[in-house]
Image (spheres, helix red, strand yellow):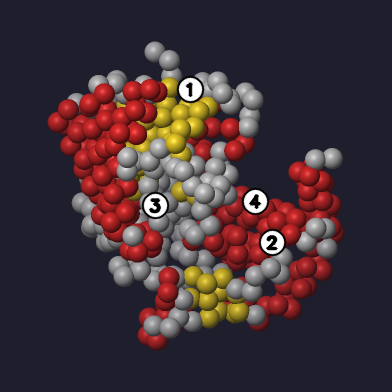
Amino acid sequence: MSKIALITGITGQDGSYLAELLLEKGYEVHGVIRRSSSFNTGRIDHIYNDPKYSGSKFFLHYGDVTDTSNINRLLEKIEPIEIYNLAAQSHVKVSFEVPEYTAEVDAVGTLRFLDAIRETGIKTKFYQASTSELYGKVQEIPQSETTPFYPRSPYGVAKLYGYWIVKNYREAYNLFAVNGILFNHESPRRGETFVTRKITRAVARIVLGLQDKLVLGNLDAKRDWGYAPEYCEGMWRMLQHDQAEDFLLQPAKHIQSENSANSPSAKSASKSTGKGMVLTKKELSQRCKVQKFFVQSSLH
Amino acid sequence: MQSAEVLRSKFTTLNQELRTKNKELSTEYKELINKTVVEVSPSYFRPTEVDLLIGNPAKAKEKLGWEAKTKLNELVRLMVKEDFQEVTLKWYTLNNV
């Protein structure tokens, strides 16, 4: 059987790294892109323009996980042996503004794919991009594959449906469908509205004198951050595993990755006044070696 | 030369300049040290927050042989380096240097 993979969300951070990985492994890769009046393929243009892949190994199709007939047609036409469902409204804060759309894409979009697999009867394996946001208000520390979920955003709640429908279809219809519960993973291709990229971009702009300051939200949040291409390798391994099982991916040792601008006074000021607060460069350099590291590393 | 090549060569020049100016820039940084660079705005707060996420990846290691390799410091270095180059190139393009 020829190695054909279908990736939704291919224009995103993970989709683009996964496409590179699968092409290197000899797959024929098909990606689903949404029509937009502005360019949205910046992360995969280098693949599309590579004569090694273009037209023979790498294909893009217009589509949308909110369009059932489109998904059915794509599956019938492409007949992938592996499907990676990375398409999502993936921004937690934005999900509070567009909760219904988030559910339509992240929850029902997953169901549409699973139903399309059943209806077309194609033999395939399905990877679902689940998320550490499922744990939300954490019920135990550290979290594992058996920790109960408690999502805290419309994004998390929509992904919770995605998680369970994958599990249910696996058990009910014997589909090879798995959830990858991935903790935060970053890269230079991370969207600029996500906190890590927002910080690194701001550091570059501040050092170059193009921006005055960096404005952040909740500094109490703690996360572990990994490197996205390694997580994409993990997705692939889940589909090569002999059994369909859910897996959690994150760095093995907990690295203290508290937000680099965090400080007790920042917390108390933002909480007590509700108006936020400011830090000076002096305070930052005293409290936060990471910031110094940012500046130094960008100059070397 | 293609425009991309022009930009690349300009960036290389800038990079060299930056290396030589490293000490001066460090001084500038010290002078700017009292300027506010990080601000917290409640407009970014969420109605319900997720304060702490720490997972145990033991199962993935045992059954998939998967392990995260890149450490946070390396990741930060990688991202800042890339952003610094991108922002510089954009600036050069916008200013027709």
Badge 3 amino acid: Ser
At 76% from the left and 43% from the top, the residue drawn is B4
For the residues labelled 2 and 3, say whether their Cβ atoms are less than 8 Å apart.
no
The residue shown at (80%, 40%) is: B2
On the image, the x and y values in percent for residue B88 come to 72, 57
Q: Residue at x 55, y 63 (%)?
A: A199
**Residue on which disc 1 sits:** A27
Q: Is residue A86 above or below residue A158?
A: above
Asked if badges 2 and 3 are on one and the same chain, I answer yes
| Residue that protrudes farthest toward the front in the picture | A37
Identify the amino acid type marked 4. Glu
Q: Position of residue A188 (x, y in %)?
A: 57, 49
Q: Secondary structure at mark 2?
A: helix
- The answer to whether dots 2 and 4 both sit on one chain is no
N-terminal label among 2 and 3: 3
Asked if one can make out residue A238 in the rendered structure from this viewpoint, the answer is no
Let me know if marks 1 and 3 both belong to one chain. Answer: yes
Q: Secondary structure at mark 1?
A: loop
Residue A170 image-quadrant placement = top left
Q: Which residue is mark 4?
A: B82
Q: Please name which of the two marks, 2 or 3, marks the residue nearer to the observer.
A: 3
Q: CA distance from mark 4 to mark 3?
A: 23 Å
Distance CA(mark 4)–CA(mark 1): 28 Å
Q: How many marks?
A: 4
Question: Percent from the top left, x then y, of residue A221?
Answer: 40, 65
Real-space CA distance between mark 1 and mark 3, rounded to the nearest whole angstrom: 26 Å
Pointer 2 residue: A296
Amino acid residing under circle 2: Gln
Marks 2,1: beta carbons within 8 A: no
Question: What number is the disc on residue A90?
Answer: 3
Tell me the SS state at disc 3: loop
Q: Nearer the viewer, residue A164 or A106?
A: A106
